[in-house]
Image (cartoon, rainbow, N blue to C red):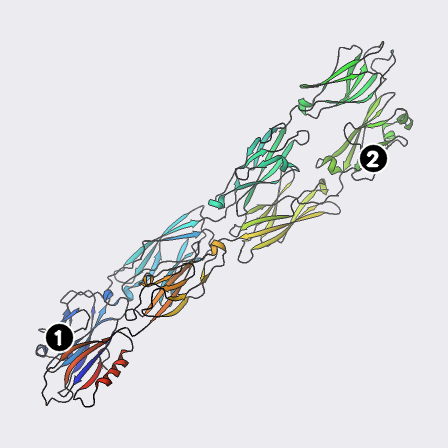
């Protein structure tokens, strides 16, 4: 560091002082005794003059790196000269000293420039740099790297960097002011599921010959993002269950996997769609996927269930599989015997084969459990005949004499019902006719001309006491015997009677007596479009990460339309379609799975909430529809890097300011929210001691003084500050601190040469004493000039002359 230095000459009278200046240039690290320059020759002095004048080198308080060989009149190396230790990064680097001679008193300024040699390799302060980078970080994201330090200067100093072969990152050197920096730029998407750790080597190169280099390892941990949806291990999980199974019975276990880790890979299971009432019968554990029975099954009411189970993660990604449950019948219903018509008395000479009683036997169980067998006791006069499925007749088998009683046993597999019958009649005639009517016809509407269609006379309907038999079922149709027609008796709602079963029909019998006859009637009830599609929930809510990849599927709730056929649910419509499109998948049961597919990346910073409408449409005339609101909250991912409000911050600080002094506050912003937008600040300096002099608050960006500053040692600091978020994204800035001088140094006076005796007739101008005054503070020249005027006394025979040893002109 240059110092302010002045020479004060106290002159009286004499010949005159002779001053001169000479410069040399040598490389650093020359061997001791090496020649610097022929000073005698270059100053035009004789070697004898050097000896007689007691020539010597004056360096003030500096180190004597060079010595004067008076025998040879040459300057030679006295001590090892290390340019980096002498001048650091300052260029040019020079040794300034004076050669003093006496008798007469003379001095000469000598400057020896020290040139750099490539004796230092670039080095990094640390052996390794570590980065935690989210796999969702965008291509082009930048990561500030530690700078290398090369104590050499010029072409021998740091020239550039190279990165070991990597297809994911590239280097980008840049400058902030005069500072050369380097950053690593992402050029290919990261995928933690394919590679969760990346290791590259950064090499710093100088420009010397031979070229020297230094390296540092860069270890990158790829942080997981919710970019994978759960995947069910099977598309269908099938199971059978007895209808009498107890609550809590384990039916199956649904399983799915998610390639993400931690909370992003945690899967929750839920029932998304199923037949009406399924949610009251079945339950799935949201954590384990265990599917259990929680209600009571009834094979006779519902024999087959297809239930959609959704496996979803915390980011809204989901997959759907189907649980198919077959309910197995058990013999849990006794047969039910219904006497449709019976005669209590008959003639004893009735002919064999005469129908005495007609019965309907019903067993809701299926297959073998539902087959009935009708058996009489050991009575020889009667027998059982079957006229059609579940309809039986008791007929005479021979001529009767007297009053008879008989017992009939109706059995299924293990159940038996007894019927006690007493009777008699004549003959059975059986027929069948079918009609078709739409649902919701007004009461009294015409169904069919039953008398005409069965070939019966209206009088026969009256005399035979014709009536309708429906068993335990409700009577929707009535018989008008006066007209011989069937009419609507009560409101017929197809959806209540048959739900989704098609075709839907009412089955009943028309019974006549004297003689006993019965006819089977089927009335098909056709659907009308009297139900619009509806959604069970008024709103569907999704929480979807903005890192969700294009093509991610989100399962939607299916609409319900109680109508069937063309009147039933036909299609869906989703609006708007800026980010999502609709996908429909046909199911084995004929229903459609509704999926919302991401077709355009989400960006929370641009739009943090999306509102869509899903409309379900049937095919009836007029066409009916139902709609549900879809609310999408876009979750933040770490896809934005911090950005400093300024690339360069400037501040001033007086030297000797106390530790704790606030220097400046830097600030950066991050568009992400929550932990993804939390910024921390650090000082990166590795070139100088700035990190030991200054500290930065990691949360606020407040830079304060923690060490001591000395204007005379260092007048400017360049502090490199990095702002980083929790996903490893960074930005950098520079803080330039100018140190202001204070008058904290006293002048130091050194008598370089003096004459204690002079002749009284000495000539004016003769140099009597040479004094070197050093003051490390700035503004020294002006102060010294002022002090000279004080030293010059009007009546003194002595005069003070000031001479700047660093600028003799």
Q: Quadrant of the C terminus?
A: bottom left
The residue carrying mark 1 is: 56
Q: Tell which of 537 and 354 is nearer to you.
A: 537
Callout 1 secondary element: strand
User: Which residue sits at x=69%, y=45%?
Assistant: 533
Pick the front one: 592 or 558: 558
Q: Position of residue 427 (x, y in %)?
A: 85, 18
Q: Which numbered disc flags the more N-terminal residue, 1 or 2?
A: 1
Q: Say whether residue 730 is left or right of residue 306.
A: left
Q: Which mark is residue 647?
A: none
Looking at the picture, how far across and down is residue 101, in whole percent? 12, 79
Cα separation between marks 1 and 2: 138 Å
Task: Report x, y in % for residue 766.
Answer: 14, 86
Say the numbered circle drawn on residue 489: 2
Q: Quadrant of the N terminus?
A: bottom left
46 is higher (above) or lower (below) than 209? below
Residue plotted at (79% across, 35% down): 436
């Amino acid at each position: 560091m240059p110092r302010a230095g002045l020479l004060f000459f106290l002159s009286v009278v004499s010949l005159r002082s002779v001053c001169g200046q000479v410069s040399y240039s040598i490389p650093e690290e020359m061997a001791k005794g090496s020649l610097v320059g022929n000073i005698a020759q270059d100053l035009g002095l004789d070697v004898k003059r050097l000896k007689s004048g007691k020539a010597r080198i004056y360096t003030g308080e500096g180190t004597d790196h060079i010595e004067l060989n008076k025998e040879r009149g040459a300057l030679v190396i006295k001590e090892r000269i290390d340019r980096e230790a002498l001048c650091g990064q300052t260029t040019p680097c020079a040794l300034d000293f004076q050669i003093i001679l006496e008798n007469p008193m003379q001095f000469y300024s000598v400057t020896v420039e020290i040139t750099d040699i490539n004796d230092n390799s670039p080095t990094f302060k640390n052996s390794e740099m570590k980065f935690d980078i989210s796999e969702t970080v965008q291509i082009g994201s930048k990561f500030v790297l530690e700078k290398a330090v090369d104590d050499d200067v010029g072409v021998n100093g740091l020239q550039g960097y190279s990165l070991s072969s990597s297809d994911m990152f590239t280097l980008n050197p840049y400058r902030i002011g005069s500072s050369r920096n380097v950053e690593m730029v992402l050029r290919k998407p990261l995928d933690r599921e394919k590679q969760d750790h990346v290791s590259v080597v950064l090499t710093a190169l100088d420009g010397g010959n031979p070229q020297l280099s230094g390296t540092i390892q860069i270890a990158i941990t790829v942080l997981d993002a919710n970019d994978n949806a759960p995947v069910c291990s099977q598309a269908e999980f099938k199971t059978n269950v007895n209808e009498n199974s107890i609550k809590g019975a384990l039916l199956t276990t649904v399983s799915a996997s998610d390639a993400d880790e931690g909370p992003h890979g945690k899967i929750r299971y839920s029932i998304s769609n199923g037949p009406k009432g399924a949610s009251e019968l079945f339950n799935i554990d949201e954590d384990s996927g265990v599917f259990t029975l929680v209600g009571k099954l009834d094979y006779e009411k519902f024999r087959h269930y297809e239930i959609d189970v959704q496996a979803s993660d915390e980011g809204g990604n989901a997959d759907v599989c189907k649980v198919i449950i077959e309910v197995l019948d058990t013999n849990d219903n006794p047969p039910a015997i219904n006497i449709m018509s019976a005669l209590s008395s008959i003639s004893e000479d009735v002919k064999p084969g005469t129908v005495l009683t007609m019965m309907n036997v019903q067993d809701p169980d299926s297959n073998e459990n539902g087959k009935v067998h009708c058996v009489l006791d050991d009575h020889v006069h009667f027998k059982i005949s079957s006229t059609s499925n579940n309809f039986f007749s008791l007929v005479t088998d021979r001529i009767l004499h007297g009053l008879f009683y008989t017992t009939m046993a109706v059995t299924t597999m293990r159940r038996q019902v007894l019927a006690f019958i007493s009777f008699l009649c004549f003959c059975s005639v059986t027929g069948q006719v079918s009609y078709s009517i739409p649902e919701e016809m007004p009461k009294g509407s015409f169904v069919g001309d039953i008398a005409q269609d069965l070939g019966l006379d209206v009088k026969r309907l009256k005399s035979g006491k014709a009536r309708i038999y429906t068993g335990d079922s409700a009577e929707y149709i009535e018989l008008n015997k006066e007209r011989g027609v069937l009419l609507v008796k009560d409101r017929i709602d197809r959806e209540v009677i048959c739900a989704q079963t098609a075709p839907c029909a009412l089955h009943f019998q028309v019974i006549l007596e004297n003689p006993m006859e019965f006819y089977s009637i089927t009335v098909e009830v056709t659907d009308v479009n009297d139900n619009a599609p509806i959604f069970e929930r008024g709103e569907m809510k999704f929480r979807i990460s903005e890192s969700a990849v294009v093509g991610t599927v989100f399962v939607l709730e299916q609409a319900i339309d109680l109508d069937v056929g063309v009147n039933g649910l036909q299609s869906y419509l989703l609006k708007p379609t800026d980010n999502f499109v609709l996908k429909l998948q046909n199911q084995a049961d004929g229903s459609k799975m509704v999926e919302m597919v991401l077709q355009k990346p989400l960006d929370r910073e641009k739009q943090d909430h999306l509102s869509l409408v899903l409309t379900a449409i049937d095919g009836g005339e007029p066409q009916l529809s139902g709609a549900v609101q879809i609310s999408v909250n876009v979750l933040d991912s770490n896809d934005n890097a911090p950005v400093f409000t300024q690339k360069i911050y400037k501040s001033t600080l007086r030297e000797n300011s106390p530790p704790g002094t606030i220097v400046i506050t830097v600030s950066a912003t991050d568009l992400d929210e929550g932990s993804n937008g939390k910024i921390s600040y650090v000082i990166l300096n590795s070139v100088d001691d700035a990190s030991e002099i200054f500290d930065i608050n990691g949360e606020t960006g407040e830079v304060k003084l923690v060490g001591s500053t000395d204007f005379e040692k260092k007048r400017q600091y360049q502090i490199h500050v990095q702002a980083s978020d929790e996903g490893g994204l960074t930005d950098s800035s520079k803080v330039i601190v100018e140190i202001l001088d204070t008058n904290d140094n006293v002048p130091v006076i050194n008598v370089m040469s003096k004459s204690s005796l002079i002749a009284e007739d000495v000539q004016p101008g003769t140099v009597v004493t040479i004094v070197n005054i050093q003051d490390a503070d700035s503004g020294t020249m002006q102060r010294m000039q002022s002090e000279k005027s004080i030293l010059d006394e009007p009546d003194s025979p002595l005069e003070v002359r000031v001479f700047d040893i660093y600028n003799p002109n």
